[in-house]
Amino acid sequence: MTVKEAVLEKLEALPAVKQQEVLDFVEFLEAKQPARKPRRSLKGSLAHLNIKWTEEDMRQARNEMWRGYTKDTWDEK
């Protein structure tokens, strides 16, 4: 038996006044729990900026970032 089934079984055995108390308590628990917004991906979060990245853009950015950090550069120092 699942928790849901057990709760429903016990709820049905209660008088109407107690069932209302259970409903009030469930609503209290819902109100106490903070609402969580679903997370968007980074791509979705930045969609309004209309940035279009291609593989070539990424390759160029990596090359620029690592330019000057080759093994030959370290040997000269």
Image (tube, rainbow, N blue to C red):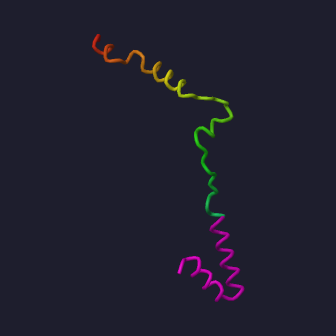
Residue 3: x and y in percent read 55, 77
Q: Quadrant of the C terminus?
A: top left
Instruction: Indicate the quadrant where residue 32 lies.
Output: bottom right
- Left or right of 41 in this view: 70: left
Q: What is the magenta segment's predominant secondary structure?
A: helix
* Rendered position, 56 above or below 13: above
Of the pair 70 and 23, the residue shown nearer to us: 70
Residue at screen point 54% across, 24% down: 57
* Stretch of the chain drawn in magenta: 1-30
- 4 relative to 15, above or below: above
x then y, percent, for residue 2: 54, 77
**Quarter of the rendering containing residue 63:** top left
The spot of residue 12 in percent (x, y) is 66, 86
Q: Is residue 20 magenta?
A: yes
| Residue 64 percent coordinates (x, y) | 47, 18
Looking at the image, the residue that sits furthest to the top is 76
